[in-house]
Amino acid sequence: MRTAEVNRETEETRISASINIDGTGEYRIDTPVAFFSHMLETFSKHGLFDLTVSAAGDMQVDQHHTIEDCGIVLGQAFKKALGDLKGINRAGYFILPMDEALALVAVDIGGRPYLQFDAEFRSRFCGQLETDLIEDFFQAFAVNLNANIVVKIIEGRSDHHKIEAVFKAFARAMKMACSLDPRATGKIPSTKGAL
């Protein structure tokens, strides 16, 4: 089974996560930012990843360390669970509408970390979540998974709808990228022979 557990404890945060890539979308999420927890639940459900996340941080300072460190830990968990990357699709993409919002997310788990993030939000907060930290979450995830991730909000009025469309599209793009191709069993998805 492609599973992993990762713990990160610093003077700013305590984050633990476990993942089963080949799950059914079961989740147990506990972070101090309710809307962010909801987005991780959405990610789990739409990617069919079994996901447990427990996060605590220096919220008296602000949310930044907690949200960013969740990206670090989840990126590391996926990297660990994917192992040698043999047989995976490697790339995935999804375009997802949610009411008036439309989000595009593409992922390449190709060993070259990079984030392209093209999204604007009307408000500083969506629920309790500081919207400018969404980019920091994806940046941390990309670097720690060694993946190229593109996030683009094409249309939208409601910040809630735009952000939720992004996380749903991200889930489905990751599901595609992590899926095993039966024709590529035991093979690295690269002409280099390594990722």
Image (spheres, rainbow, N blue to C red):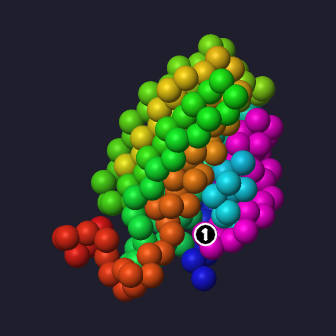
Quadrant in which the C terminus is drawn:
bottom left
Name the residue at the top extreme.
122
Tell me residue 134's x, y (percent): 58, 34
Identified at 37% across, 80% down, the residue is 184
Corner quadrant of residue 144: bottom left
Residue 60 position within the rendered picture, expressed as x and y whole percent measured from the top left? 74, 29
Measured as percent of width and height from the top left, residue 80 is found at 50, 70
Spot the residue most to the bottom.
186
Most extreme residue toward the left is 192
Image-based side of 151 in relation to 40, left or right: left
Q: Is residue 187 magenta?
A: no
Residue of label 1:
21
Report the span colored magenta: 15-41
Is-magenta flag for residue 30? yes
101 sits left or right of 154 in the view: right
Q: Nearer the viewer, residue 91 or 133?
A: 91
Taking the spot 68% from the left edge, 54% from the top edge, the residue there is 46
